[in-house]
Image (cartoon, helix red, strand yellow):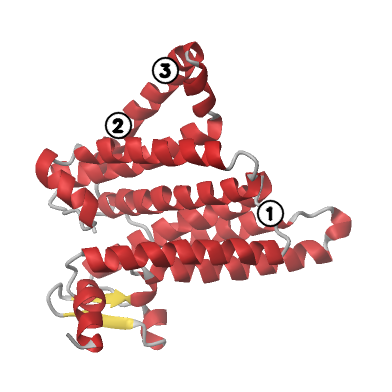
Amino acid sequence: MALSELIATYYVNPIIYGTGYNIVNTLTYALVLVAAAFGTYRLLQRMRITVDRDFFIGIAPFIALGGMLRALEDYYQAAHINDALAQSLNFIIYSPVQGKYLNLLLITPVMYFTMFIIALVALLAAIGIASLARKQRVRYHHVWFAIGAALIAAVALQYKITDGNAALMMLGVFGAWVALALLVKQFVAPRFAKLNAFMSAENTFLMLVHLFDASTTFVSLQFYPYVEQHVVPQFFIGIFGPIAMFFIKLPVVALVLYYLDKDLRHEKEKRNFIKIVVMILGLGPGLRNFFRLAMQA
């Protein structure tokens, strides 16, 4: 198979024809994610940005923005609305099978690079503004957060929620998990030292982020005509049904967090950064699913 044919078969056509992921592009994207995460961490070190609570506050809106923009692209596709900016920059392609125009800037995996550029430009602007206003004790993460919040507001103004029942179902399923997590943290974890240590506020939050993603996926697959496009979840869902999402997410995320706390306990910044990546992989897709279904895109 020629290189051009291989690229078309495993990378380009799945985007154009909406056939989802395959083993080849899944492994490739996973490797790219690892390399990109490592490169980003090194960049932050060179910029002397500490990956701490302030950094998390600043980047949080951009993580949410990624999922919201992806849902907006789904809405544009469903409504056959062309993205004027992307079209003017020649980032619009037409999918003959789906009968939709696609904005490559907002299609995974390109979407991650788009959000990286947006967040980085906003970070540099925030650092510049904070430097100019240092006498007023303006902190970079406050400015960074404000820029992200303004972008979220601009995107939210374009939303049209059409299915309140879908939103309530997703929130209901997720709410049940939140209640269970709180009960375990309050009454069960204190009886077991290791479980209590594991269920820190940040680990509980990250677990719930991924359970939110699983809840939105479960409702989308169980009650609506959507299909899972990722290779591994698709395999287990084919055997056990949509409920398999919870049994994939829980052990995998728990193991990742456990070994991060165990192996990187003396490297706090690196651990914090990887946990932010874990959050991105859960919150972005979860918000995309939530708003896509609520807007019936």
**Can residue 207 be seen from the camera position used here?**
yes
Residue 217 rendering spot, x and y as whole percentages: 25, 46
Residue 189 rendering spot, x and y as whole percentages: 47, 17
Residue 47 rendering spot, x and y as whole percentages: 71, 66
Labelled disc at residue 279: none
Left or right of residue 145: residue 132: right
Q: CA distance from mark 1 to mark 2?
A: 33 Å
Would you call the spot at circle 1 few (<14 residues within 10 Å), some (14-19), or many (20 or more)? Answer: many
Q: Amino acid at mark 2?
A: Gly
Q: Amino acid at mark 3?
A: Leu
Would you call the spot at circle 3 few (<14 residues within 10 Å), some (14-19), or many (20 or more)? Answer: few
**Callout 3: SS:** helix
Q: Which residue is denoted by mark 2 in the rendering?
A: 172
Q: CA distance from mark 3 to mark 1?
A: 33 Å
Residue 118 rendering spot, x and y as whole percentages: 54, 69
**Can residue 108 be seen from the camera position used here?**
no
Which comes before the other along the chain, label 3 or label 2?
Answer: 2
**Callout 1: SS:** helix
Look at the picture and state if 116 lies above or below 165: below
Q: Which quadrant: the C terminus? A: bottom left
Residue contact between numbered discs 1 and 2, judged by CB atoms under 8 Å:
no
Left or right of residue 133: residue 39: left
Q: Which residue does the image show at 46% across and 47% down from the upper left?
A: 279
Camera-near label (1 vs 2) is: 1
Q: Which quadrant: the N terminus? A: bottom left
Q: Residue furthest right?
A: 135
Q: Which residue is denoted by mark 1 in the rendering?
A: 141
Q: Amino acid at mark 1?
A: His
Which comes before the other along the chain, label 1 or label 2?
Answer: 1
Q: Which residue is denoted by mark 3 in the rendering?
A: 183
